[in-house]
Amino acid sequence: MNDIVIIGAGIIGCSIARELSKYQLDITVIEKNLDVAEGTSKANSGIVHAGFTEKKNTLKGSLVAKSNKMFDILSDELEFSMVRNGALVLAYDDNDVRKIEQLKKNGEELGITGLSILDTEAVKRKQGNITKGVKAALYAETSAIVNPYDMTIAMAESAALNGVNFKFGANVVNIEKNGDIHTIYLENGEDIKSRFVINAAGLFGAEINNMMNEEKYNIRGVKGEYCLFDKIAGAAVKNTLFRVPEEKGKGVLVTPTTDGNLIVGPNSQKEQSVSTTREGIDEIIEKASKVIDELPVKRVITSFSGVRAKTESGDFIIEALKDNEQFINVIGIDSPGLTCAPAIAEYVSDMISKNLIMIKKHNFISKRHKMVRFAELSVEDKNKLIKDNPEYGRIVCKCELVTEGEIIDAIHRVPGAVTLDGVKRRTRAMMGGCQGMGCMLPICKIMSRELNVDISEINKNSAYSPAVGFREV
Ligand SMILES: Cc1cc2nc3c(=O)[nH]c(=O)nc-3n(C[C@H](O)[C@H](O)[C@H](O)COP(=O)(O)OP(=O)(O)OC[C@H]3O[C@@H](n4cnc5c(N)ncnc54)[C@H](O)[C@@H]3O)c2cc1C
């Protein structure tokens, strides 16, 4: 019997799990996919926003500045990479200048520090290749970049290290409450019992709410497409660059990633599929070309998209049900949800503490160690590692210099990788110029051996996505 079940292993579910793992509680995270960060948390801009576009008197506005500040300690404790690279919102005419002044004022009223207005010369000093005609910019020094799935994996590993149980391939199809206890029914026929349920099901948050709540919700999917450029293009920008925000959102940005690539996007389309389209890619390339000169379009290595979970109010929904304080919705977490995740986790923990005795663990382990990245080591450290463990001497992904030792580690961590995408996100194998053409098969063979399954059972991501050949359902 669980004290708390969290539905959804995205950044929100995993951050809440990690926060609650500080207490003496039995917690299970239930995820319908085979890994963490398989929903929106794997496909977004990865910006820790300063938060100056958020409205006062909203949950987003009240959480964003506080949460942004939490990233220094968290990235240090959990060893996920974060770079405080600062953001520029570029103004090209008087109207734009008025807008960035308003954004600065709004940000300061939200408690955001480090906001300043820069003139043309100061902007050019920060970023020499900004397009001609820039008049001024709002500079936000607290804006940062993270790798969103790396952060989600780090949160999940820390939660697991502190006793949280993860159940994958577990699609919730119904929930009932009898007395003090919820029964959560899974598609595979199993059921799980828990006193508290936290709905962190992202785009499917309304479906989970509607299983329990008289008040029905509707969450709209709004897709955003991206282009990812190789690491040579990554040097094109240092800061995260925006034009002034559009009606539909923050607009197309140009930013480096923590891994050294360049990313541009997202656009905004009312649909839930994660396919990318020629028109969408043309739109973001055109908009990004208005931000920097000579966008290196020939260096695009892949495109992808993520889907925002939009509520009617435009704000996050974080609430207990009116007639059931043991069921908590944490849904409609669109941007800046990645930024707000640490503060949301504390907020939810405070809500639960009003109805559940929560005793702090004396043995909570705050530190989580990241995986060894062979490519980042000095020659001396590489040699020592290979001497201790020869598996680190066998390069499997030549583009990103990923070794067999790292792939084995990714598989055996908790929660570990059981799909090709899981290995990819943990190690960067298959993320280089050839996008896995050279190393996919050797990785499948290693996974087959380490997981003790036939190679035909290795999936790319979902439960039926055979990586090699074809298999009967
Ligand atoms: C284009 C785009 C750009 C963005 N950029 C930024 C940014 O730069 N900075 C920022 O702060 N935020 C950004 N965001 C927002 C951020 O990505 C989200 O707020 C965050 O990822 C939401 O996390 P989540 O855990 O709520 O959802 P998800 O990551 O989608 O997780 C929900 C999980 O629930 C699981 N689930 C669903 N239904 C069930 C079920 N029935 N049973 C079991 N499991 C289930 C899903 O499989 C999924 O894994 C962006 C979003 C998008 C789409």
Image: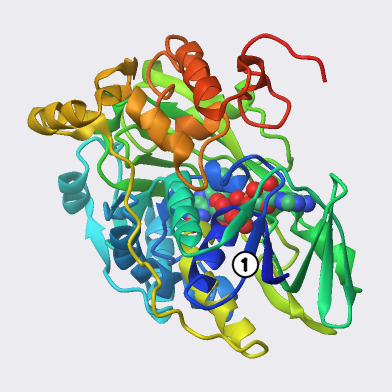
Say which quadrant the N terminus sits in: bottom right
Q: Is residue 238 left or right of residue 226?
A: left
Foreground residue among 182 and 247? 182
Look at the image and tell me whether residue 244 can be seen.
Answer: no
* Residue positioned 43% across, 78% down in the render: 110
Classify residue 51 by image quadrant. Answer: bottom left
Q: What element carries label 1?
A: strand
The correct choice, above or below, for 16 with respect to 353 in the image is above
Specify the quadrant of the image occupied by residue 293: top left
- Which residue sits at x=88%, y=82%? 179
Q: How many marks?
A: 1
Q: Which of 347 and 63 is in front in this view?
A: 347
Depth check, front residue: 257 or 426: 426
Kindly give the residue lying farthest to the left in the view shown.
Answer: 380
Where residue 63 appears, as percent x and y from the top left, is: 49, 74
Location of the C terminus (image quadrant): top right
Q: Position of residue 64 (x, y in %)?
A: 46, 70
Could you tell me if residue 350 is visible in this image?
yes
Q: Residue at x 29, y 17 (%)?
A: 394
Q: Give the colour scheme shown.
A: rainbow
Asked which quadrant contains residue 144, the reply is: bottom left
**Ligand 1 neighbours mark 1 (CB distance < 8 Å):** no
Q: Say if 125 sits above or below 164 in the image.
A: above
Between 200 and 78, the one nearer to me in the picture = 78
Identified at 56% across, 78% down, the residue is: 349
> Callout 1 environment at 10 Å: few (<14), some (14 to 19), or many (20+)?
many
x, y percent for residue 369 = 32, 52
Q: Name the residue under label 1.
A: 27
**Identity, as a three-letter code, of the amino acid under mark 1:** Ile
Left or right of 56? Residue 72 is: left
The image position of residue 119, as x and y in percent, is 22, 56
